[in-house]
């Protein structure tokens, strides 16, 4: 607000810093401030995401749930047993009648 009320001071400071006009100096300061704010928000969001992940992990490990009994009718172990049984019986090729 100071430079809005006294634009000559902005011009003087801009000349001292090597910037052409006071308006350009204000614009550069605004861009720098915006980048700092965005970086700060990014770091806060990242920290919150990490905290949420750790809390969810702790909750999942402290209260494990049993999987439903019939959620998946064919498990890997069931498929392995079935393939062994088929190999032992010497199943006929597809399209032929069994003995």
Image: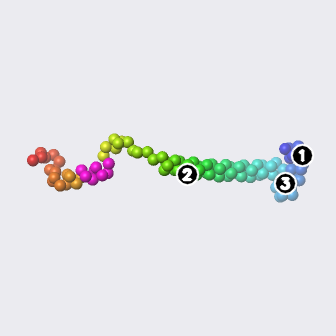
> In the image, is 35 to the left or to the right of 64?
right
Q: Residue at x 82, y 55 (%)?
A: 19
Q: CA distance from mark 1 to mark 2?
A: 52 Å
Q: Earlier in the sequence, mark 1 or mark 3?
A: 1
Judge the density around disc 2: few (<14), some (14-19), many (≥20) Cα neighbours within 10 Å: few
> In the image, is 97 to the left or to the right of 14?
left
Residue 54's disc is 2
Residue 6's disc is 1
The colouring scheme, among rainbow, by chain, secondary structure or one colour, is rainbow
Query: In front: mark 1 or mark 2?
Result: 2
Q: Which residues are magenta?
A: 75-82
Judge the density around disc 3: few (<14), some (14-19), many (≥20) Cα neighbours within 10 Å: some
> In the image, is 60 to the left or to the right of 34?
left
Element type where label 3 sits in the image:
helix
Q: Are marks 1 and 2 in contact (CB under 8 Å)?
A: no
Q: Nearer the viewer, residue 58 or 92?
A: 58
Residue 20, given in percent of the width and then of the height, sits at 83, 54
Element type where label 1 sits in the image:
loop
Residue 14 among those drawn in magenta: no
Residue at the spot of label 3 = 14
Residue 21, given in percent of the width and then of the height, sits at 83, 51
Element type where label 2 sits in the image:
helix
Q: CA distance from mark 3 to mark 2?
A: 48 Å
Residue most toward the front? Answer: 62
Residue 29, given in percent of the width and then of the height, sits at 78, 51
Q: Nearer the viewer, residue 34 or 44?
A: 44
Q: Earlier in the sequence, mark 3 or mark 2?
A: 3
Residue 42, given in percent of the width and then of the height, sits at 64, 50
């Amino acid at each position: 607000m100071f430079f809005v009320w006294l634009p000559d001071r902005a011009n003087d400071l801009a000349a001292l810093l090597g910037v052409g006009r006071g308006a350009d100096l204000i614009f550069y300061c605004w861009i720098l401030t915006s980048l700092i704010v965005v970086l700060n928000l990014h770091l806060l969001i990242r920290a919150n995401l990490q905290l949420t992940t750790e809390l969810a992990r702790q909750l999942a490990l402290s209260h494990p749930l049993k999987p439903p009994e019939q959620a998946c009718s064919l498990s890997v172990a069931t498929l392995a047993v079935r393939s062994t049984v088929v190999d032992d019986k010497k199943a006929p090729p597809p399209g032929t009648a069994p003995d």
